[in-house]
Amino acid sequence: MNLNPHQLDQDGYDVRGFSHGLYIGGTWRQSSDGRLIDVVDPSSGAVIAAVPDATLEDATAAVEAAAKAARGWRETAPRKRSEILRRCFELMVERSETLAMLISLENGKALRDARGEVAYAAEFFRWNAEEAVRITGEFGTAPSGTNRIMVDYEPIGICVLITPWNFPAAMATRKIAPALAAGCTVILKPASETPLTAYALAALYSEAGVPAGVVNVLTTTNPGPLTSAMLADPRVRKLSFTGSTGVGRTLLAEAAKNVISCSMELGGNAPFVVFDDADLEAALDGAMIAKMRNAGEACTAANRLYVQSGIHDAFADGLRKRMAALRVGAGTNADTECGPMITKRAVDKIDRLVNDAVSRGAKVLCGGSTLEGEGFFYPPTVLADVPPDAAMAHEEIFGPVAPITRFEAEAEAIAHANDTEYGLAAYIYTRDVGRGMRVASRIEAGMIGLNRGLMSDPAAPFGGVKQSGLGREGGQHHGIAEFMEAKYIAVTF
Ligand code: NAD
């Protein structure tokens, strides 16, 4: 695949099969003022494509399209909605290699990570196709005996979905699939760094039978005002956001003006705790996954590694060997294990955090300084003796840096783990299941990996506590419930 700059023809449809105009009401279009956003390959810094930069007028058109399609979709039989979602899953699986290549190209992640993302993203369609026909209500007798209590679950209304660049496919399908299963119509605003995947998926949905206007996609460099305008429309009833805690706070305040229901998947600062009795090889395998999936650009990434003193040196040495052996390169190269960061700004942030830790006494075991040459690369890095006051113990690193801190007692590890405003994911390695469960119950996080370096699963509720967010995505009923309202009917008969 070879994308050329500004390859958008008159109809907003890329001639090589990748659609990337604004997708509104089932048609591809340019933005109303014709402006474009450059898409950059992070492995070279070169511009590889351009997508429309939506205006307020375009955002209004997207809300109109979603409103027009709302009734038809809400009244589409659950079985039919389910079959369309199932078809989305099948088409994603059929095209997984092409989609993975596109993700690698615009996001930079290694192809093996991109393949993993496509499989994960597609699962949201399969899972929600299965859930779409299992949305039930409740029925009971009021305690007074005077009437019956009936509870029906209805689609909440038009949803605005905003997603980050780090999982361009999965963060979109994790919202779109349950919203559609619930009977809602949506407007997706993907990150402008990675719009091509979102548009490629939009083309796939229509092919799967998703009616025009049910999913609308627009990219913009002006997300604040466009989002405010969409949220001010009384027909919009839901904002589902995945991104940084700072932007999440701004959007919560904005949504409050119109009392919009919000789901917020925000930042993380996951602790990775290894006890003396852990299986060393399993803990190292888990650390590599928890740290290095997407080269560390994941909200669930292990951000702080706390290792008990008895296993500390063996673990640190094992991690150093594995990290130093990783092949760094363009994500699209078949043998790359660690791709570039998304932007130069991201590299600069990592560099600042590493320099800060080193200035406070951390030891560099491998990596530790930026790489020369084109693209936005940072080498896999392991730091030891990272003090608790290092900035990286409190901020998301979002890169391939593993900071290790030694601890002695269980209570100390729990205190370290909870010493953060975030509460998304945490990892614990121990052979003592009793201790594992005890520590899991004391760590303040929405998700715990106990002897596992990966917990994301469409069948399980994903989300955080504290400043990591509100609500859950996926899971048996949690994900769909975010897109439904309970309607209570008191009945006497
Ligand atoms: P970001 O907050 O900068 O941007 C996220 C999205 O919000 C993008 O689409 C962006 O264009 C948009 N946006 C930015 N300002 C906006 C505004 N004022 N109004 C409306 N939209 C606005 O985050 P990012 O850098 O793209 O992503 C990385 C962050 O996302 C990290 O903090 C990471 O932890 C978090 N994240 C969380 C989860 C989760 O499930 N909890 C998953 C992935 C990423």
Image (cartoon, rainbow, N blue to C red):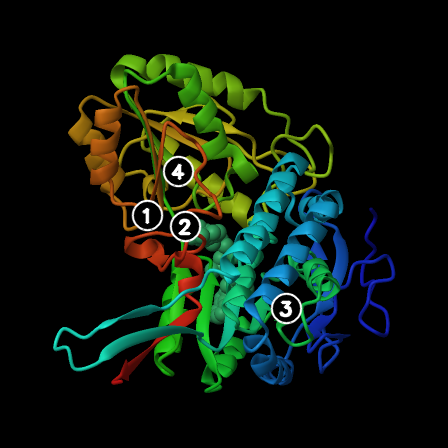
Residue behind label 2 places its C-beta within 8 angstroms of ligand 1:
yes
Q: CA distance from mark 1 to mark 2?
A: 7 Å
Q: Amino acid at mark 4?
A: Asn
**CB contact under 8 Å: marks 2 and 4:** no
Q: Nearer the viewer, mark 1 or mark 3?
A: 1
* Inter-mark Cα distance, 3 to 4: 30 Å
Q: Nearer the viewer, residue 432 or 257?
A: 432
Q: Residue at x 69, y 50 (%)?
A: 90
Alpha carbon distance from label 3 to label 2: 26 Å
Q: Which mark is residue 219?
A: 3
Quick check: 272 left or right of 149?
right
Q: Quadrant of the C terminus?
A: bottom left
Q: Secondary structure at mark 2?
A: loop
Tag 3 or tag 1, which sits nearer the N-term?
3
Considering only order in the chain, which callout, 4 or 1, is on the residue closer to the N terminus?
A: 4
Side of 93 relative to 488 (left or right)? right
Amino acid found under the numbered disc labelled 2: Phe
Of pointers 1 and 2, the one earlier in the residue sequence: 1
Q: Is residue 59 visible?
A: no
Residue 154 position within the rendered picture, expressed as x and y whole percent measured from the top left: 43, 75
Given contact means CB atoms under 8 Å apart, are the residues at marks 1 and 3 in contact? no
Marked residue nearer the N-terminal end (2 or 4): 4
Provide the residue designation for mark 4.
303
Q: Is 440 situated above or below 208? A: above
Tell me the quarter of the picture where residue 355 sits: top left
Label 4 crowd (10 A; few <14 / some 14-19 / many >=20): many
The label nearer to you, 2 versus 4, is: 2
Task: Give, as a three-letter code, the residue at label 1.
Answer: Gly
Q: Which residue is mark 2?
A: 462
Query: Which residue is the site of mark 1?
Result: 446
Q: Are marks 1 and 2 in contact (CB under 8 Å)?
A: yes
